[in-house]
């Protein structure tokens, strides 16, 4: 007897090439009624073919017993079991004590007349549960890795189409085309969601009040962003105006101090420049003087306004 190797498709394939024990026929009571998940992947025969099989079993008996694994789950013979029930014939069973998944693949992928797409879909489904590689499955099922990759895409983005591919009513190519469209749509949606999360995070920092309105669903994210951009534009323009006015004021004040320093000292900066002298005005162009001027800008502006502006 050959001991069953670990559940790895490559090792199971090796196990299938070794002799394995066929136990004596079992009574129907030893069948647990469970269908091994690997066996359940493959479609049943059409009704007319199943009836033909039932008639043959009724006339000639069940030639090939239903195969169970060591736990009593069916791994091969669902159609034969159904036909026996239709024919009123008691089925017989044998037990395969080797690797169940490899047996299912051997009995279905290589024995049945199924398309490359069906093979790829079956292998893709089995690889997921057996932690094997696409290379393993492609070699065993005589199907390309690219086809298995297509089947994996179908399983991920259009899984409900998998049974139709397995049944042969839908080609893998058509199922893959649909899965690809869904993949692109999902990725586009995910990109939009990620961008929205980034925008909302920025909004929480730059305009928390608007972010709160978005959270309360009182305004859309797009509307909040537009409002924030409008605020930022207005603030930018305000700062530009303030900067221009400040620079213009400095330039004009500098010109005035050159022409009429005593007037500036007497009328505009009476507190900061108590000496009311040219030396006091020169203090304006020191670091401390600039700080003094910053505190006095309102007074300077009032002075210019009282004189009718810069003219």
Image (cartoon, rainbow, N blue to C red):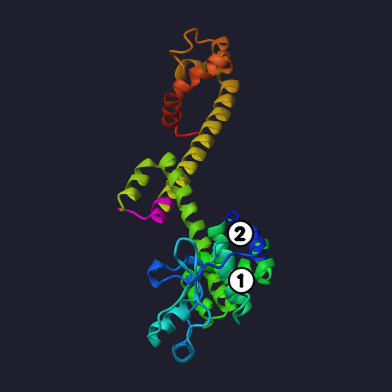
C-alpha distance separating marks 2 and 1? 19 Å
Q: Main secondary structure of the magenta part?
A: helix
Q: Is residue 221 shown in magenta?
A: yes
Quarter of the image holding residue 34? bottom left
Q: Secondary structure at mark 2?
A: loop
**Residue at x 61%, y 71% (from the top left corner):** 106
Instruction: For label 2, count other residues whose C-alpha is less than 10 Å away and answer few (under 14), some (14-19) or many (20+).
Output: few
Q: Which residue is more in the foreground, 217 or 77?
A: 77
Q: Position of residue 18 (x, y in %)?
A: 66, 63
Q: Position of residue 17 (x, y in %)?
A: 67, 65
Q: Which mark identifies residue 106?
A: 1
Locate residue 225 relative to residue 165 in the image: left or right: left
Which residue reaches farthest top? 275
Locate residue 208 relative to residue 246 in the image: left or right: left
Q: Is residue 186 above or below residue 58?
A: above
Question: Can I make out residue 311 in this image?
Answer: no
Instruction: For label 1, count other residues whose C-alpha is less than 10 Å away and answer few (under 14), some (14-19) or many (20+).
Output: some
Q: Position of residue 283 (x, y in %)?
A: 56, 13
Q: Position of residue 274 (x, y in %)?
A: 47, 8
Numbered range of the magenta stretch? 218-225
User: Mark 2 = which residue?
Assistant: 1
Question: Can I make out residue 5 in this image?
Answer: yes
**Residue at x 33%, y 54% (from the top left corner):** 219
Which residue reaches farthest front? 24
First in sequence: mark 2 vs mark 1: 2
Q: Is residue 214 above or below residue 170?
A: above
Q: Quadrant of the N terminus?
A: bottom right
Locate residue 291 relative to residue 138 in the image: left or right: left
Q: Secondary structure at mark 1?
A: helix
Q: Is residue 246 above or below residue 95?
A: above
Q: Which residue is more in the foreground, 303 or 62?
A: 62
């Amino acid at each position: 007897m050959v001991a069953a190797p670990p559940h790895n498709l490559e090792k199971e394939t090796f196990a299938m090439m070794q002799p394995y024990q066929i136990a004596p026929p079992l009574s129907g009571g030893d069948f647990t009624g469970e269908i091994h998940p690997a066996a359940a992947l493959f479609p049943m025969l059409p009704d007319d073919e199943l009836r033909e099989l039932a008639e043959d079993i009724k006339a000639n008996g069940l030639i090939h017993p239903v195969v169970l694994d060591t736990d009593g789950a069916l791994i091969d013979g669902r159609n034969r079991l159904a036909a026996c029930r239709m024919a009123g014939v008691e089925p017989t069973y044998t037990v395969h004590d080797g690797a169940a998944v490899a047996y299912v693949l051997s009995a279905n992928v290589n024995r049945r007349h199924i398309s490359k797409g069906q093979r790829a879909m079956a292998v893709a489904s089995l690889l997921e549960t057996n932690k094997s590689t696409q290379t393993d499955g492609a070699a065993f099922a005589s199907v390309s890795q690219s086809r298995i990759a297509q089947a994996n895409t179908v399983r991920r983005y259009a899984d409900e189409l998998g049974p139709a591919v397995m049944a042969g009513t839908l080609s893998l190519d058509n199922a893959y085309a649909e899965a690809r469209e869904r993949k692109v749509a999902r990725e586009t949606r995910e990109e939009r969601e990620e961008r929205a999360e980034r925008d909302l995070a920025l909004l929480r920092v730059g305009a928390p009040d608007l972010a709160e309105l978005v959270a309360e669903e009182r305004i859309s994210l797009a509307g909040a962003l537009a409002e924030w951009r409008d605020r930022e534009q207005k603030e930018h323009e305000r700062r530009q105006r303030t900067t221009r006015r400040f620079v213009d004021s400095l330039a004009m004040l500098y010109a005035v101090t050159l022409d009429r320093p005593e007037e500036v000292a007497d009328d505009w900066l009476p507190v900061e420049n108590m000496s009311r002298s040219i030396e006091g005005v020169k203090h304006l162009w020191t670091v401390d003087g600039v700080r003094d001027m910053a505190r006095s800008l309102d007074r300077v502006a009032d002075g210019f306004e009282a004189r009718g502006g810069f003219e």
